[in-house]
Image: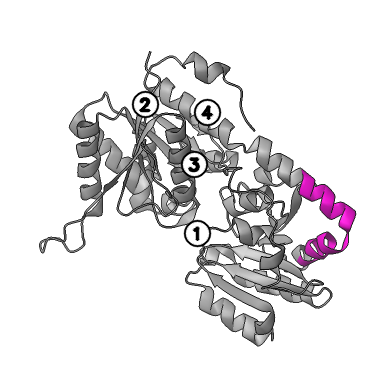
Amino acid sequence: MKERLKIGITCYPTLGGSGVVATELGKLLAEKGHEVHFITHSMPFRLGKFDRNIFYHEVEVNDYYVFKYPPYDLSLASKLAQVVQLEELDLLHVHYAIPHAVCALLAKQMVGDKLKVVTTLHGTDITVLAQDESLSDLIRYAINQSDAVTAVSKDLIEETRRLLNIEKHIDLAYNFVDKRVYFPREVTDLRKEFAQPDEKILIHISNFRPVKRVTDVVEIFHRVAQEIPCRLLFVGEGPELSKVLCRVKELGLLDRVTFCGKQDDVAQLLSLSDVMLLPSEKESFGLVALEAMACGVPTVASNTGGIPELIVHGESGFLADIGDVEQMAHYTKQLLTDKPLYEKIVEACLYRARFTFCNDVITRQYEEIYYRVLGLPIPDELKLKPLNC
């Protein structure tokens, strides 16, 4: 019986929740004894320290003069096939239908049907790209031809079926956080660098794309700050950053807002915060909200996409309609002024992050999918070993 698998993982290595989850999953699989090969255009930024079961293969794109644009897709497919043959991989786990699943399927045609392809849908490939008629057929093909498909929320599964008329089974595999990294930390000294002892700290983390509605964060903070001494931390960068900065200046809030830029280790910043603001127009899951929950920080968010599957309104955070900054500000003030309510919600956040979205549970779920597509029995050790949630 084969218990140690050889797994290739392809993702966007430098940005977004999909790259974070793919990298963390690979690290956890390696810890469990599987051999994991990351096949990406650059080193995944969350890869961290050396692990004897983790290998990295760089996809190099040759810019031939006959091509108008560098052929990343073809280079990736060729590299996938090369690594599969050289390392005798059992399967490829690719994150995003295009281009990664399409490239993996092309690699499979080159090396043979013995290779299996598992595709994880994270959101943008469905919520944005699948609505483009020039891409929808390609995404549908990638999903239907994959040996297994997973999605990070029920909402994303339903949207995939609706937009692409997909009947293929899609496994629900929620995102997760590593509880050894995301937990409430003692950061008293660090907190002093951002706020006075009597001030609360609100935080927003994103890639500052329009869909994140980051200017709504400023509007919410403005309303809260009129009644409660507080500070706001922005973590990340992106196209809307200049617009956000302008609005902060217009409202005279510049001395109360800190722009932290991109940060690899956000657990400390989350631990010193009191409330996470996530007023997005669309979130297929909302990984930053889960990271906040795991650090004991409640989130006030939009009631959209997969967020309601993560945050139970009134129990582990609060949800409001998209764009309703007044209601979001009200919930934020409620959290910051009602200590018993705040403590109750923090406790629910910690429990939900640790047990419902336990990294051990989700990792085991992916392992079971791998054995299923390979036609192998699930090892007794995997079935019988207790989870450490």
Is disc 1 surrounded by few (<14), some (14 to 19) or many (20+) residues within 10 Å? Answer: few
Mark 1 vs mark 2: which is more N-terminal?
2
Q: Position of residue 112 (x, y in %)?
A: 21, 27
Is disc 4 surrounded by few (<14), some (14 to 19) or many (20+) residues within 10 Å? Answer: some
Q: Considering the image in quadrants, where does the N terminus appear?
A: top left
Mark 2 vs mark 4: which is more N-terminal?
2
- Disc 1 target residue: 264
- Element marked by disc 3: helix
Rounded to the nearest whole Å, what is the CA distance between mark 2 and mark 4? 13 Å
* Residue 336 shown in magenta: yes
Q: Are marks 1 and 4 in contact (CB under 8 Å)?
A: no
Quarter of the image where one finds residue 361:
top right
Q: Considering the image in quadrants, where does the C terminus appear?
A: top right
Specify how the rendered protein is coloured: one colour
Hey, what amino acid is under mark 3? Thr
Residue 364, label in figure: 4
Q: Is residue 51 visible?
A: yes
Is residue 272 rendered to the left or right of residue 11? Answer: right
Rounded to the nearest whole Å, what is the CA distance between mark 1 and mark 2? 29 Å
User: Which residue is farthest left?
Assistant: 66
Residue 230's place in the image compared with 207, above or below, is below
- Element marked by disc 2: loop
Q: Are marks 2 and 3 in contact (CB under 8 Å)?
A: no
